């Protein structure tokens, strides 16, 4: 039989791209099928009016030792060459205090003590930091997690490190418990800070996030933060380029509409504006969310098997986003800013917004005297939370940006915004849910979705699977999927 490729990867976000790159490195011919006109999904960049905007993600970590993007670079020889940021983030609290989230732990503890008082801060952050390092170091050692076969268990045993023992218990401890342990639970200002920080990195609040994920999320700024000149789309271009140089192909505007498992291969159907295509491949990696993946298989057995793993809209988030350009460049010592709002945003109900600037030295995204701004905020339960009047949200955003002195509306030369509906179109994800599956205490890491999907030749990765959130998580999910394919021997087949 003539195959169109060895492996079809559905979706070209960071999870799919990671899997595609690693499969290409293994000598596999990869077909990357992307429904959008542009690769990258929630972490890409698009041109509009001579400017370059980020589609979703703006912050970038994962290139320190033991982290997923560094692993990808090391395995493949790819060089992303992002710029290192000296200050990862600033946070503007409701009471007017501005915190600088320094990378250096001691400097950060001193800053936290200045704003929240000295009680418990040093001990809290030292424990979080230790856990965060443990989580990243272990994740790349235990690449067959969560185990679902004897081979996975053997892999886990042969890669076992004694320090893992004590940490498994931490999946039962929430960030709220950790605050209580250090006498910080009554500190309302600190609680509010932790909640809003967790929301952008773990998609949930302190009572729902276990400390393995929570500490990693809270210490996001204690790892090296980077900026991709030209936008995150440049990283996507490099990864797509690698796949193509290794005999693979990216087909955009190719939405997979059906997956038909045959005896020892898969037939994939696609229909774009009436143009039908079929692809025959040995293996499939779906990097789209689990509910969307199930729709493509349309198999009652799998639908039943995975029912309990699917989160519905009321447990998920979408995003409201605003891209704008201003004619002002002074005072940009930090690119990323979380602003806590003086009132909840209309429709979205969120209590903070996140602003990221383009780098002042980045001439690819705007003119020399301009900056591109990206604002994003959560919209919970997107199936029910239609954002009807964008202008109302934009007004509140501008009032708050002016209040903290980050930008003035009079300096704006161009602005547009997007709602959950825009996300549904951009990514084809149900209800436009984005940002990954939020953390919930009742879902332990080992209960998250395994990369082996149909137990045959189809695998799954992406931000609704283990461990899946943010660029590093999505990237790690792709690494895990390929490791399981290796263990199953499917990459050896000719
Ligand atoms: C507003 C916002 C801000 C964020 N900020 C950050 C941040 O600052 N830092 C960070 O690390 N992370 C951030 N994230 C999270 C991060 O962007 C995502 O978790 C990650 O990019 C998800 O990657 P993915 O590959 O799992 O999914 P996606 O990026 O959604 O990729 C899936 C791809 O599959 C395609 N697709 C869907 N259905 C089909 C189909 N049937 N056929 C073919 N193709 C299909 C989609 O078009 C898409 O390109 C942010 C997310 C959002 C939305």
Image (tube, helix red, strand yellow):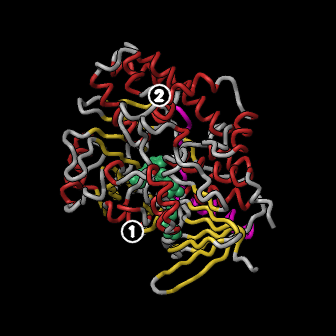
Task: Answer with left or right where residue 295 lies relative to residue 422.
Answer: right
Could you tell me which residue is drawn at 35 percent across and 51 percent down? 317
Q: Read off the magenta span.
A: 222-247
Could you tell me which residue is drawn at 24 percent across and 59 percent down? 387
Nearer to me, 83 or 155: 155
From this viewpoint, is residue 371 visible?
Answer: no
- Label 1: which secondary element: helix
From this viewpoint, is residue 321 visible?
Answer: yes
Q: Position of residue 254 (x, y in %)?
A: 53, 76
Q: Is residue 426 magenta?
A: no
Residue 425 has which mark?
1
Q: Which residue is mark 2?
A: 172
Q: Position of residue 450 (x, y in %)?
A: 58, 49
Q: Earlier in the sequence, mark 1 or mark 2?
A: 2
Nearer to me, 374 or 290: 290
Q: Which image quadrant for residue 420? A: bottom left
> Which of labels 1 and 2 is toward the front?
2
Establish if 314 lies above or below 493.
Answer: above
Quarter occupied by the N terminus: bottom right
């Amino acid at each position: 039989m003539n195959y169109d490729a060895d492996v079809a990867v559905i979706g070209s976000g960071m999870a799919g791209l990671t899997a595609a790159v690693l499969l290409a490195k293994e000598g596999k011919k990869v077909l990357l099928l992307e429904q959008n006109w542009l690769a990258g999904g929630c972490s890409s960049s698009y041109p509009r009016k001579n400017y370059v905007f980020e589609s979703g993600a703006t912050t970038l970590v994962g290139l320190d030792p033991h982290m997923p993007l560094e692993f990808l670079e090391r395995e493949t020889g790819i060089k992303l060459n992002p710029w290192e940021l000296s200050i990862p983030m600033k946070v503007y609290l409701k009471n007017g205090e501005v915190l600088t989230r320094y990378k250096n732990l001691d400097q950060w503890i001193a800053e936290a003590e200045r704003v929240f008082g000295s009680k418990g801060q040093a001990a809290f952050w030292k424990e979080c930091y230790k856990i965060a390092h443990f989580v990243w170091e272990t994740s790349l050692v235990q690449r067959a997690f969560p185990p679902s076969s004897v081979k996975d268990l053997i892999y886990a045993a042969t890669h076992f490190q004694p320090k893992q023992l004590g940490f498994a218990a931490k999946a039962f401890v929430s960030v709220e418990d950790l605050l209580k342990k250090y006498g910080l639970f009554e500190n309302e200002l600190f609680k509010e800070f932790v909640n809003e920080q967790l929301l952008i990195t773990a998609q949930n609040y302190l009572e729902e996030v276990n400390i393995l994920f929570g500490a990693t999320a809270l210490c996001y700024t204690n790892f090296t933060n980077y900026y991709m000149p030209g936008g995150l789309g440049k990283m996507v271009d490099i990864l797509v380029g690698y796949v193509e140089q290794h005999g693979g192909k990216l087909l955009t505007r190719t939405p997979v509409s059906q997956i038909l498992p045959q005896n020892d291969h898969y037939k994939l159907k696609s229909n774009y504006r009436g143009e039908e295509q079929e692809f025959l491949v040995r293996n499939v990696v779906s990097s789209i969310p689990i509910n969307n993946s199930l729709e493509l298989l349309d198999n009652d057995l799998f639908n039943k098997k995975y029912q309990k793993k699917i989160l519905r809209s009321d447990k998920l988030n979408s995003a409201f986003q605003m891209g704008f350009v201003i004619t002002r460049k002074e005072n940009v010592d930090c690119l990323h800013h979380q602003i806590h709002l003086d009132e909840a945003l209309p429709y979205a109900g969120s209590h903070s917004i996140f602003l990221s600037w383009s780098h002042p030295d980045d001439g690819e995204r705007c003119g020399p005297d301009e900056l591109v701004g990206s604002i994003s905020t959560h919209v919970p339960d997107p199936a029910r939370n239609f954002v009807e009047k964008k202008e109302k949200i934009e007004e509140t955003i501008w009032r708050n940006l002016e209040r903290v002195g980050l930008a003035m509306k009079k300096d704006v030369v161009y602005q547009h915004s997007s709602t959950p509906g825009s996300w549904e179109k951009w990514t084809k994800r149900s209800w436009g849910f984005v940002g990954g599956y939020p953390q919930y205490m009742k879902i332990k890491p080992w209960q998250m979705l395994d990369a082996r999907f149909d137990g045959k030749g189809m695998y799954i990765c992406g931000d609704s699977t283990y461990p899946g959130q943010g660029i590093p998580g999505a990237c790690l999910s792709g690494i895990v999927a390929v490791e399981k394919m290796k263990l199953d021997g499917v990459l050896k087949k000719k």
